Amino acid sequence: MKLLIVEDEPNLLSILRKGFAENNNEVSVAMDGKTALEMLHNYNFDVVILDVMLPDINGIEICRRLRAGKNFVPVLLLTALGTSENIVTGLNAGADDYLVKPFKFGELDARVNALHRRAHQDTERIDSITVGDLEINARAKTVKRDGESIVLTAKEFKLLYYLAKNSGRIVSRDQILDNVWDINFDMNTNVVDVYITYLRKKIDKPFETKLIHTMKGLGYVIKP
């Protein structure tokens, strides 16, 4: 893998760089947000390990800028702020996973490998899915309903794609967390419900026929 590690604490940065390099990864590093954004603009990486607390542009803002620029490289946030609110903020900004400091290198390595596998699998998925009058192009990452283009964030698109891929089947919140965020939360979180609400406003609200349905106590299903 080609990894970018963005961390301003020299000792931790050295440990991470050494650990990933010893596992036969190509490792680049940045110690501030500005440098990280420049590197992400000029080079392609498989996974970004991004500290939240940086001296100039914080990790949350870097995530927002990446996703706004249509850069969907997998991002794992390192955070000393382990509260549900802070973690959800990071995920909402476009991060794919998080790890709370302090952590064991083995867990970080496993999560990075999981993100890389998921990204690789995504490139092999089918190009398009149709559910009723909803059209999803996975390769172009475009969505249309009744011929009208709908703009989604990266995470909204991933959630919609997962629901559509399982059209007609109920998927639980845990399944969504595992497949869309690629993580198992160790807390009670409403991030899935929040994103379902976001999707409904864009996918269902402007149209007479609703596609996204809540199955009380079970999860969600998308169907005509």
Image (tube, rainbow, N blue to C red):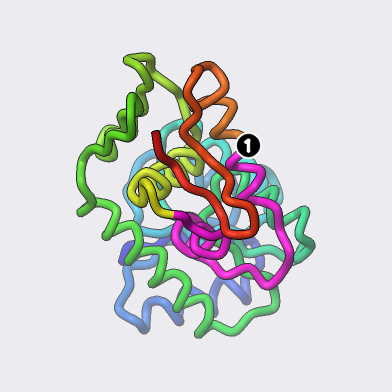
Q: Position of residue 41 (x, y in %)?
A: 40, 39
In what quadrant of the picture does the N terminus appear? bottom left
Q: Nearer the viewer, residue 72 or 6?
A: 72
Q: Is 16 left, or right, of 188 in this rendering?
A: left
Residue 143 visible to an observer of this rendering = yes
Q: Residue at x 71, y 50 (%)?
A: 55
The quadrant where residue 217 appears = bottom right
Count numbered badges in the picture: 1
- Find residue 198 and report its horizontal and vertical position in percent: 60, 34
| Residue tagged 1 | 197
Secondary structure found at label 1: helix
Residue at (52, 46) in percent of width and height: 35
Q: Does the magenta-highlighted stretch encompass residue 61?
A: no
26 shown above or below 213? below
In percent of width and height, residue 199 lies at: 54, 34
Callout 1 environment at 10 Å: few (<14), some (14 to 19), or many (20+)? some
Residue 5 at x, y percent in the picture:
49, 62
Residue 53 shows in this picture: no
Q: Residue at x 62, y 45 (%)?
A: 92
- Report the magenta residues as a range: 170-197
